[in-house]
Image (tube, rainbow, N blue to C red):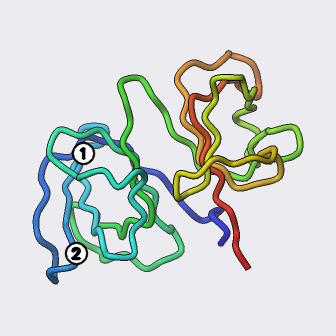
């Protein structure tokens, strides 16, 4: 699956309510002082199977190519949700052989303490170059591209 059409919303969950069915949820986020509603379905990947609750800081990735209802506040269908610690950032992108993101905004320096795993949490034993990666990091340099040693990398393996 290609993730190049995915967009990210970061925010703090304000409320979690039942969605249109018993298998879906509607979460309301505060993102940049705005309210955003996110539909969480049974198909949504929730990293580490966290329990979504009010007060949790999250990054939500949604497919920008899917139609969205013209309502206020905006409403998106979540494809991936992950929790974020204080000061932590998450980026979902393709990283080339030099571990530079496809938009040239971030370069990774994989360190000995970087946890590299697959989407289901298993150790990834190969090098993560030329892959779609979900990267968790805090500090970056001011260079172009910014460089960071990520805390965790999730390799979005494409199974045939």
Who's the residue at 72% across and 23% down the image? 111
Circle 1 crowding by C-alpha within 10 Å: few under 14, some 14–19, many from 20: few
Choose between 83 and 115: the one closer to the eye.
115
Q: Is residue 60 left or right of residue 34?
A: right
Q: Which residue is mark 1?
A: 34
In which image quadrant can residue 149 be found? top right
Q: Which residue is mark 2?
A: 24
Image quadrant in which the C terminus is located: bottom right
48 on left or right of 149:
left
Residue 18 location in percent, x, y? Answer: 11, 71
Point 79% across, 39% down: residue: 100
Residue, x 50% and y 68% (percent of image)?
63
> Among all residues in the image, which is located at the extreme right?
97
Closest to the camera, between mark 1 and mark 2, is: 2
- Secondary-structure class at tag 1: strand
Q: Residues within 10 Å of mark 2 (few under 14, many from 20)?
A: some
């Amino acid at each position: 699956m290609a993730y190049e059409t995915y967009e990210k919303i970061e925010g703090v969950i304000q409320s979690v309510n039942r969605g249109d069915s018993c298998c879906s949820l509607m979460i309301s986020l505060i993102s940049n002082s705005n309210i955003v509603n996110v539909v969480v379905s049974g198909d949504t990947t929730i990293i580490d199977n966290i329990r979504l609750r009010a007060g949790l800081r999250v990054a939500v990735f949604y497919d920008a190519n899917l139609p969205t209802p013209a309502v206020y506040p905006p409403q998106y269908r979540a494809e991936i949700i992950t929790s974020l610690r204080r000061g932590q950032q998450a980026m979902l992108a393709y990283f080339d052989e030099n571990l530079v993101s496809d938009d040239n905004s971030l370069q990774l320096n994989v360190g000995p303490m970087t946890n590299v795993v697959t989407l289901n949490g298993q150790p990834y034993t190969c090098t993560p170059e030329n892959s779609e990666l979900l990267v968790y990091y805090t500090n970056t340099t001011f260079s172009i591209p910014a460089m960071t040693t990520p805390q965790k990398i999730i390799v979005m393996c494409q199974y045939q």
